[in-house]
C-alpha cells in the first residue's frame, strides 16, 4: 500500500506555498469549471439547447481529472506532472484491488434482494449484452475517467497524510457528493430523503474507492473500472434477471444501505489483513 503514516502536524495553513497553490488550482478546475458551466448549460437547456447540454454533460466533468494534473504541475512543474502521471497510470499492483473491483458492486447489488430473494429465481435466461451495452465509451468517460484522476489520484493522498485511508475516503465523500449539486439539484437534492440516500451511497463508494486506490499503490485504473461498474449495477443485474421488473433492480435507498454495509466490511477486512502479519510476527519473536 502506498500511503504513509498519517502526519498529525498536517494543516492546510501550514502547507508549502506551491502545494497550497496546487490545491487551489484543483478546486478552481473541479468546481469552478464544472459548476459555472453546468449552471450556464442548464439555463440554455431551458431555452431548448438540449444538444449543447448533452455535450456539456460529456465534456465538463473532466474539470476534476484535469484539475488533478493541473494541480500536480503547479506543485512540481513538469517533474511533478510526470510523477503524478506515472503514479496514477503506470504503478504496478497486486490482485487485491481487482478482487474489490469485481466483488463489491456485485455483493452490494445482491444485498438489495435480502427482502425479496425470490426475485433472484426464474427471471429468464441471462443476456449479458444488456450489461455490455452499458459499458460504452460515453459511460467510461463521463464519470470514471473524467473524475478519478482528480478525486482519487490527486485529492485523496492529501487527506491520507492526516487520516487513515478509509477515513480519508469518508471525508472525501461529501465533497464528491456536493460536486454533483448543479446536476441533481432539482432531482436528488430536491428533498431530504433522496439527498440523504445519495450522500450515503456516494460516501460508501468513496470509502471503497479509497481502499481500492490505496491497494493499487496510487494507480487509479482500478478505481476507474470500479466507478464504471458501480454506475452500471442496475444494468448488470438486468442482464442476469431480464424478466425482473425495473423497480426491483438495485437502486435507491436499499442500494445506498447495502453499499454502506459493503464499505464497512471492506474497512474491517482491510484493517484485519493489515494487523494479521504484525500479530503473527509478534508471536514469532523470541523472549
Image (tube, rainbow, N blue to C red):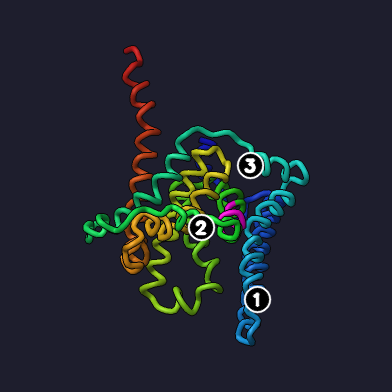
Q: Are discs 1 and 3 less than 8 Å apart at CB?
A: no
Which is closer to the viewer, label 1 or label 3? 1
Most extreme residue toward the top is: 286
Which stretch is magenta?
143-148
Residue depicted at x 51% and y 57%: 133
Q: Quadrant of residue 21?
A: bottom right
Q: Quadrant of residue 89?
A: top right
Q: Is residue 4 above or below residue 253?
A: above
Residue depicted at x 23% and y 57%: 117
Q: Is residue 255 above or below residue 157?
A: below
Which is closer to the viewer, label 1 or label 2? 2
Most extreme residue toward the bottom is: 47
Toward the viewer: 260 or 187?
187
Toward the viewer: 157 or 93?
93
Q: At which x and y percent is residue 214?
A: 51, 41
* Residue 89 numbered tag: 3
Q: For the residue labelled by badge 3, is the local secondary structure a helix, a strand or a loop?
A: helix
Left or right side of 228 for 195: left
The crowd level at tag 2 (other Cα within 10 Å; few <14, some 14-19, many 20+) is few
The residue pinned by badge 1 equals 51
The residue pinned by badge 2 equals 133
Q: At which x and y percent is residue 55?
A: 66, 70
Q: Are discs 1 and 2 less than 8 Å apart at CB?
A: no
Q: At which x and y percent is residue 195?
A: 41, 71
Query: Where is the C terminus found, in terms of image quarters?
Result: top left
Residue depicted at x 68% and y 49%: 16
Amino acid at each position: 500500500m502506498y500511503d504513509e503514516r498519517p502526519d498529525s502536524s498536517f494543516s492546510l495553513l501550514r502547507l508549502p506555498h506551491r502545494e497550497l497553490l496546487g490545491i487551489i488550482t484543483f478546486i478552481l478546475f473541479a468546481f469552478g469549471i464544472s459548476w459555472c458551466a453546468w449552471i450556464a448549460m442548464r439555463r440554455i437547456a431551458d431555452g431548448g439547447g438540449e444538444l449543447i447540454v448533452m455535450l456539456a454533460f460529456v465534456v465538463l466533468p473532466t474539470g476534476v481529472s484535469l484539475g488533478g494534473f493541473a494541480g500536480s504541475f503547479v506543485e512540481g512543474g513538469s517533474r511533478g506532472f510526470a510523477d503524478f502521471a506515472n503514479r496514477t497510470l503506470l504503478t504496478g499492483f497486486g490482485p487485491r484491488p481487482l478482487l474489490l473491483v469485481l466483488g463489491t458492486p456485485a455483493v452490494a447489488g445482491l444485498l438489495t434482494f435480502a427482502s425479496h430473494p425470490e426475485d433472484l429465481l426464474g427471471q429468464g435466461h441471462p443476456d449479458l449484452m444488456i450489461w455490455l451495452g452499458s459499458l460504452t465509451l460515453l459511460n467510461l468517460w463521463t464519470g470514471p475517467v473524467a473524475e478519478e484522476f482528480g478525486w482519487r489520484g490527486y485529492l485523496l493522498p492529501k487527506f491520507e497524510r492526516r487520516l487513515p485511508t478509509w477515513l480519508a475516503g469518508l471525508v472525501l465523500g461529501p465533497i464528491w457528493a456536493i460536486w454533483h449539486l448543479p446536476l441533481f439539484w432539482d432531482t436528488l437534492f430536491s428533498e431530504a430523503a433522496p439527498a440523504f440516500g445519495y450522500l450515503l451511497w456516494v460516501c460508501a463508494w468513496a470509502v471503497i474507492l479509497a481502499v481500492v486506490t490505496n491497494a493499487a499503490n496510487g494507480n487509479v485504473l482500478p478505481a476507474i473500472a470500479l466507478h464504471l461498474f458501480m454506475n452500471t449495477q442496475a444494468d448488470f443485474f438486468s442482464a442476469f434477471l431480464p424478466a425482473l421488473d425495473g423497480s426491483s433492480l438495485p437502486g435507491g435507498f436499499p442500494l445506498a444501505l447495502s453499499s454502506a454495509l459493503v464499505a464497512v466490511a471492506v474497512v474491517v477486512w482491510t484493517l484485519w489483513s493489515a494487523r494479521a502479519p504484525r500479530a503473527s510476527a509478534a508471536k514469532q519473536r523470541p523472549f
